[in-house]
Image (cartoon, grey):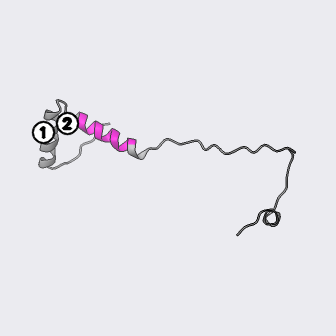
Amino acid sequence: MVKTIRISNELYAKLRKMAEDGACTVRLIVRELEAALFRNTVKPRRRVKLPIIRSKRPGTLYLDNERIFELIDFP
């Protein structure tokens, strides 16, 4: 998709100067800017690893809030 944007003559002159100094094109500078913007905003999801606690007596334990407060001393 091709889009037209309006930028000031001063900004375009600076972009062209950067392109000449870097031996590239204005289009390449804009594409690098686009890549940098997306690279900083899109973060890969990180998988969370929860600790596994092995039980000596496996089975189902039914707890409610009242029972948890009985078992654990909260400040």
Q: Residue at x 12, y 47 (%)?
A: 9
* First along the sequence among labels 1 and 2: 1
Indicate the secondary structure of the residue bearing disc 2.
helix
Indicate the secondary structure of the residue bearing disc 1.
helix
Q: Is residue 1 left or right of residue 4?
A: right
Q: Residue at x 72, y 43 (%)?
A: 52
Dominant secondary structure (helix, strand or loop) of the stretch shown in magenta: helix
Corner quadrant of residue 24: top left
Disc assigned to residue 56: none
Name the foreground residue: 2 vs 11.
11
Q: Residue at x 39, y 45 (%)?
A: 40
Name the foreground residue: 23 vs 49.
49
Task: Say which of marks 1 and 2 sits in front.
Answer: 1
Residue 23 at x, y percent in the picture: 16, 29
Residue labelled with disc 1: 17
Position above or below: 28 against 40: above
Q: Disc 1 marks which amino acid?
A: Lys
Q: Disc 2 marks which amino acid?
A: Val
What residue range appears in magenta?
Answer: 28-39
> Is disc 1 surrounded by few (<14), some (14 to 19) or many (20+) residues within 10 Å?
some
Residue labelled with disc 2: 26
Position above or below: 66 against 16: below
Question: What is the distance, in whole Å, between disc 1 and disc 2 at their CAs?
Answer: 9 Å
